[in-house]
Image (cartoon, rainbow, N blue to C red):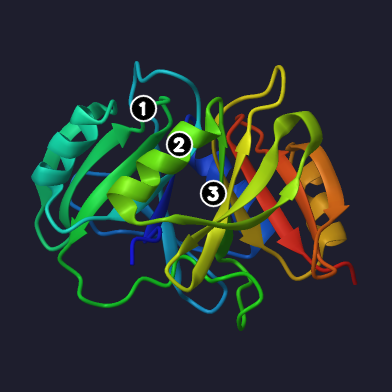
């Protein structure tokens, strides 16, 4: 199994980001306790840790962004294989005692993500498969928007075992391909619309999509599209937070 085990927001204004997401998703935010580092833990209302919040490193390319962590057995071995397959290393491997060894890389099309060999033997609950149990506050869908979906699918299939399992037609953009990690439906892969931005978009589950849309606007965020009805009777929307980080929301209309 190689599903996302952690999510991380790199923000230019950490305090403002904390306020926006805490109000929007009812997250609890606390300090990680890591010495000499302002790294904040994001947890659901039930206290389940799903990710982290930190200052975007000065001089890093792009803007504020959500990143995901994928599990590997050996970070250094995986780094070599990813580079050989056309990926790049953005941050070399490092070890954080008590946490694990990790590195920041890109796939061959340039989308960044972390790989991590965790020291924690507990199963991550950051991701909750859409439609299973109480998923509010968790990521329930991982969407890769790619300029070359075939190449992206082949890459993640080789390195993480993901498989194309069904989909929906999207006209000129081709198929919206569902991605499966074994029996788990983890998200989808789609082509990049003209003028669109490739990369990852992580969808957080909410209890009321219209209330969430109102909170986005009140908090200074921007709704790119939606809410749009999706299979199963729920609604999704794509959002930019006030600092420009892209993410999605999914939930019912009450």
Mark 3 neighbour density, 10 Å: few (under 14) some (14–19) many (20 or more): many
**Residue 151: x %, y % from top left:** 44, 32
Position above or below: 66 against 121: above
Mark 2 neighbour density, 10 Å: few (under 14) some (14–19) many (20 or more): some
Q: Residue 108 got which mark?
A: 1
Please name whichever residue, 40 or 92, is drawn nearer the observer in this view of the structure.
92
Residue at 33 percent of width and 67 percent of height: 1
Residue at 34 percent of width and 20 percent of height: 58
User: Residues at badges 3 and 2 in contact (C-beta under 8 Å)?
Assistant: no
| Dot placed on the residue nearer the N-terminal end, 1 or 3 | 3
Residue 221 relative to residue 92: left or right: right
Residue at 33 percent of width and 27 percent of height: 57
Residue for badge 3 = 18
- Mark 2 to mark 1 CA distance (whole Å): 8 Å
- Mark 3 to mark 2 CA distance (whole Å): 32 Å
Q: Nearer the viewer, mark 1 or mark 3?
A: 1
**Residue 108: x %, y % from top left:** 36, 27
Mark 1 neighbour density, 10 Å: few (under 14) some (14–19) many (20 or more): some
Whether residue 188 is visible, yes or no, is: yes
| Dot placed on the residue nearer the N-terminal end, 2 or 1 | 1
Please name whichever residue, 220 or 245, is drawn nearer the observer in this view of the structure.
245
Whether residue 41 is visible, yes or no, is: no
**Residue 138: x %, y % from top left:** 55, 66
Please name whichever residue, 160 or 198, is drawn nearer the observer in this view of the structure.
160
Position above or below: 8 against 109: below
Element under disc 1: loop
Residue for badge 2 = 152
**Residue 198: x %, y % from top left:** 56, 28
User: Residues at badges 1 and 3 in contact (C-beta under 8 Å)?
Assistant: no
User: Residues at badges 2 and 1 in contact (C-beta under 8 Å)?
Assistant: yes
Element under disc 3: helix
């Amino acid at each position: 199994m190689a599903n996302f085990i952690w999510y991380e927001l790199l923000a230019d204004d950490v305090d403002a980001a904390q306020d926006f997401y805490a109000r929007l998703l009812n997250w609890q935010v606390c300090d990680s306790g890591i010495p000499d580092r302002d790294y904040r833990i994001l947890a659901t209302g039930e206290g389940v840790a799903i990710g982290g919040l930190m200052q975007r490193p000065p001089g890093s390319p792009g803007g504020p962004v959500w990143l995901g962590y994928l599990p590997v057995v050996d970070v250094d071995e995986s780094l070599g294989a990813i580079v050989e397959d056309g990926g790049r290393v953005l941050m070399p491997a490092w070890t954080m005692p008590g946490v694990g060894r990790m590195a920041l890389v890109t796939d061959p099309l340039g989308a960044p993500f972390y790989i991590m060999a965790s020291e924690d033997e507990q199963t991550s609950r950051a991701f909750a498969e859409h439609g299973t149990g109480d998923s509010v506050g968790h990521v329930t869908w991982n969407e890769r928007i790619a300029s070359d979906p075939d190449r992206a699918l082949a890459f993640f299939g080789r390195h993480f075992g993901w498989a194309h399992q069904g989909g929906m037609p999207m006209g000129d953009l081709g198929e919206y391909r569902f991605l499966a990690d074994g029996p788990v439906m983890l998200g989808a892969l789609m082509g990049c619309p003209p003028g669109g931005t490739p990369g990852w978009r992580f969808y957080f589950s909410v209890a009321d999509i219209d209330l969430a849309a109102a909170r986005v606007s009140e908090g200074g965020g921007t709704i790119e599209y939606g809410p749009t009805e999706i299979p199963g009777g729920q609604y999704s929307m794509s959002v930019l937070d006030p600092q420009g980080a892209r993410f999605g929301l999914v939930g019912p209309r009450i």
